Every structure is written in structure tokens, then in C-alpha cells.
């Protein structure tokens, strides 16, 4: 008889994935602060208003790719840097599954 290993635990519905705009905003704010820049400095170089940048950082605006690119350019970053950084953040925040929980063993 085959031995079945437990399936991975299902995610709890009350624990949804974060929204992309929140992840982008958190990352943009972190980058700006690491550089010691003000909202006004970055907004001026990006060609957007301080209010709009603030709303982006707080995840209140679903910014277009053009707006995100403008802010990244003002911070000396690229879209690749942003997405890789967000992926790293998500990996670090993810719970580590129990050893073998993702494997089903089918034996004869």
C-alpha cells in the first residue's frame, strides 16, 4: 500500500496576498529613505507632485508603469531592481513549509 504524505496546509482566507501597489509603495519609500531623500526631492526629479508620490508610497495609488519608472529613475533604480527587491521581501516574509510537506509520495 502506498504511503501518503500530508499535503501543504492551505492558506487561510483571512491572510490574503498583499496588493502590488502596497509592495511597490513600501519598496519606493524604503529606497528613498535609504538615500536620505525627501519626497520633494524625488518628486521634483521624477516630474510628479509630492502628493502623488506620497500616495504611491502609501499604496493608495495604482500608479502606471510610466509613473513607477519615473520615480525609479529619480532614485537611480530600474524596474528589475524593484521587482527583484519585492521578490526578496516576499521570500523573506513567507513561512517556511515543513520538510516534505510539499511532496506526495506514490509508492507501489
Image (cartoon, helix red, strand yellow):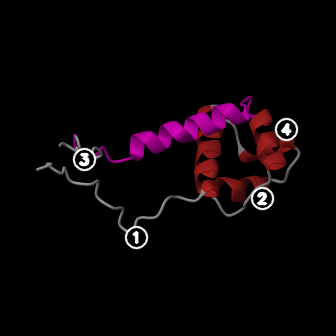
Which numbered disc, 2 or 3, marks the residue closer to the eye?
3
Which tag, 1 or 2, sits closer to the chain's start? 1
Q: Label 4 crowding class (10 Å Cα cut-off): few <14, some 14-19, many 20+?
A: few
Q: Label 3 crowding class (10 Å Cα cut-off): few <14, some 14-19, many 20+?
A: few
Which numbered disc, 3 or 1, marks the residue closer to the eye?
3
Q: Residue at x 66, y 38 (%)?
A: 32
Q: Which mark is residue 53?
A: none
Q: CA distance from mark 4 to mark 1?
A: 41 Å
| Residue pointed to by mark 1 | 13
Q: CA distance from mark 1 to mark 2?
A: 34 Å
Which numbered disc, 4 or 1, marks the residue closer to the eye?
1
Q: CA distance from mark 3 to mark 1?
A: 20 Å
Q: Which residues are magenta?
A: 75-99
Q: Residue at x 28, y 58 (%)?
A: 9
Q: Residue at x 81, y 48 (%)?
A: 67
- The verdict on residue 94 being magenta is yes
| Residue pointed to by mark 4 | 45
Q: CA distance from mark 2 to mark 3?
A: 46 Å
| Residue pointed to by mark 3 | 101
Q: Circle 3 sits in a helix, a strand or a loop, which is it?
A: loop
Q: Circle 1 sits in a helix, a strand or a loop, which is it?
A: loop
Amino acid at each position: 500500500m502506498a504511503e501518503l504524505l500530508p499535503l501543504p496546509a492551505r492558506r487561510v482566507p483571512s491572510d490574503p496576498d498583499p496588493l502590488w501597489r502596497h509592495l511597490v509603495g513600501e519598496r519606493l519609500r524604503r529606497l528613498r529613505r535609504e538615500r536620505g531623500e525627501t519626497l520633494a526631492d524625488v518628486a521634483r526629479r521624477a516630474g510628479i507632485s509630492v502628493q502623488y508620490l506620497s500616495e504611491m508610497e502609501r499604496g493608495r495609488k495604482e500608479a502606471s508603469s510610466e509613473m513607477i519608472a519615473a520615480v525609479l529613475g529619480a532614485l537611480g533604480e530600474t524596474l528589475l531592481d524593484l521587482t527583484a527587491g519585492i521578490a526578496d521581501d516576499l521570500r523573506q516574509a513567507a513561512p517556511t513549509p515543513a520538510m516534505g510537506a510539499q511532496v506526495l509520495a506514490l509508492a507501489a
